């Protein structure tokens, strides 16, 4: 599957009532991914789910620790790949739209998120 999906139809919308709601007193934002992007992300996450189940099986079968650790590294890499795709789409759409709307606090939000991803 291609790593770099060029289709970034990921819109935060008009930041109005249609794409926001309230939950526990906080504004809840929604993104709108293209069907191709949703399918790509879902496929990747399904594969990761299978890898996790495989790792559980390896542990249940007392598989050599180094082999299990290598599988864990593969899952972490796959999750990082999903995160990169989402981050790229977010920056190309939502972040730009919010900055253009004068919502510069999105930069602080993005920095917090990037720090979490880099742990």
Image: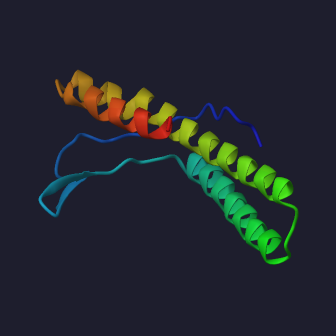
Residue 98 vs 38, above or below: the answer is above
Q: Residue at x 79, y 74 (%)?
A: 57
Q: Residue at x 16, y 64 (%)?
A: 24
Horizontal arrangement in the rendering, residue 53 relative to residue 14 (left or right):
right
Residue 112 vs 29, above or below: the answer is above
Q: Nearer the viewer, residue 16 or 40?
A: 40
Q: How is the image coloured?
A: rainbow
Residue that lies at the very extreme toward the left in this rendered image? 25
Q: Give coordinates of residue 37: x percent, y percent.
A: 58, 46
Q: Give coordinates of residue 87: x percent, y percent.
A: 48, 35
Quadrant in the picture for the N terminus: top right
Residue 9 visible in image = no
Locate residue 26: give its quadrant: bottom left
Number of marks: 0
Residue 19 vs 57, above or below: the answer is above
Q: Nearer the viewer, residue 104 or 73?
A: 73
Locate residue 43: give its quadrant: bottom right
Residue that lies at the very extreme toward the bottom in this rendered image? 60
Q: Residue at x 74, y 66 (%)?
A: 50
Residue 3 visible in image = yes
Q: Nearer the viewer, residue 50 or 1?
A: 50
Q: Residue at x 50, y 31 (%)?
A: 88
Q: Give coordinates of residue 34: x percent, y percent.
A: 52, 46
Horizontal arrangement in the rendering, residue 64 relative to residue 103 (left or right):
right
Q: Give coordinates of residue 55: x percent, y percent.
A: 76, 65
């Amino acid at each position: 599957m291609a790593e770099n999906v060029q289709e970034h139809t990921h819109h935060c919308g008009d930041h109005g009532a249609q794409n926001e709601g309230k939950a526990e007193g906080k504004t809840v934002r929604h993104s709108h991914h293209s069907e191709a992007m949703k399918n790509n992300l879902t496929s990747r996450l399904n594969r990761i789910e299978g890898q996790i189940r495989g790792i559980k099986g390896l542990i249940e079968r007392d598989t050599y620790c180094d082999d299990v650790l290598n599988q864990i590294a593969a899952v972490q890499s796959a999750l990082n790949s999903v995160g990169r795709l989402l981050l790229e789409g977010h920056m190309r759409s939502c972040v730009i739209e919010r900055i253009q709307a004068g919502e510069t606090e999105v930069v602080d939000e993005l920095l917090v998120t990037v720090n979490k991803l880099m742990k």
